[in-house]
Amino acid sequence: AQSVTQPDIHITVSEGASLELRCNYSYGATPYLFWYVQSPGQGLQLLLKYFSGDTLVQGIKGFEAEFKRSQSSFNLRKPSVHWSDAAEYFCAVGANAGNMLTFGGGTRLMVKP
Amino acid sequence: DAGVIQSPRHEVTEMGQEVTLRCKPISGHDYLFWYRQTMMRGLELLIYFNNNVPIDDSGMPEDRFSAKMPNASFSTLKIQPSEPRDSAVYFCASSLVGSYNEQFFGPGTRLTVL
């Protein structure tokens, strides 16, 4: 069975600083990988996804993520964080069966002015 | 498209009452998922449907929880009787076969059981 680990429960960065959120997965086959963002009181919004091909994927709001098969990782990055990026971020891996996703525990990002 | 629609957005009820949460998936999607989110347990998959048929309900916590999908555009999650520990945000998501498992989430229903 697949699993997803987000090692950092909380991260605080200063506005304008760079950001990297970590995600490690366990899955036997080629994974489908996702990052979702959840703003307070909102549902989950897709930031970006990886299915195949170029291992560096670009998403919305200036985010990118890199798939590293050797490290079983799919870390999310942003070169310069804005105060509006404060939210909870979820990494997820998809199994072929049933269109299901397995989510990590989430990382809550706080942005200091 | 309007996206996944959930109602109500907020529900406050008293212990023992029946609660019904509603979801309208994105038109044409053939998978529908119900999740529960709490601080303690994070995001949990409760049940999912494919073409209106329940496929896996192993995440449904107790017999007090039931879910139905009478047609492709409507699903309900019912809790009867409700208990304070059911307080959570309940999300519905839908997905299209062949879309590499990408799911689209609704805004959620925040349930408070007093």
Image (cartoon, rainbow, N blue to C red):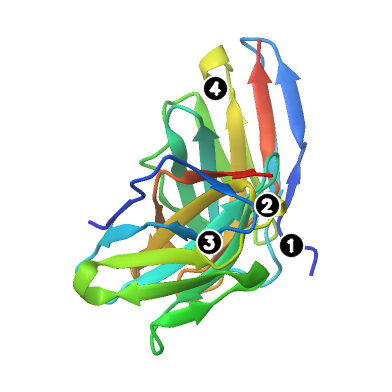
Residue type beneath disc 1: Gly
Residue B86 is tagged as 4
Residue at 42 percent across and 31 percent down: it is B41
Earlier along the polypeptide chain: callout 4 or callout 2?
A: 4
SS for callout 3: loop
Find disc 3 in the rendering and name its residue. Answer: A18
Task: Determine the CA span between mark 4 and mark 1.
Answer: 26 Å
Q: Say whether marks 3 and 2 touch (CB < 8 Å).
A: no
Residue type beneath disc 2: Gly
Residue A66 vs B82, above or below: the answer is below
Residue at 35 percent across and 41 percent down: it is B58
- Looking at the image, which is closer to me, A106 or A81? A81
Residue type beneath disc 3: Ser
Q: Position of residue B45 (x, y in %)?
A: 45, 45
Chain letter for mark 3, please.
Answer: A
Find disc 2 in the rendering and name its residue. Answer: B106
Task: Determine the CA span between mark 3 and mark 2.
Answer: 30 Å
The mark closer to the camera, 4 or 3, is: 3
SS for callout 4: helix
Chain letter for mark 1, please.
Answer: B
Residue B100 is tagged as none
Find disc 1 in the rendering and name its residue. Answer: B3
Image quarter where the C terminus of chain B lies is: top right
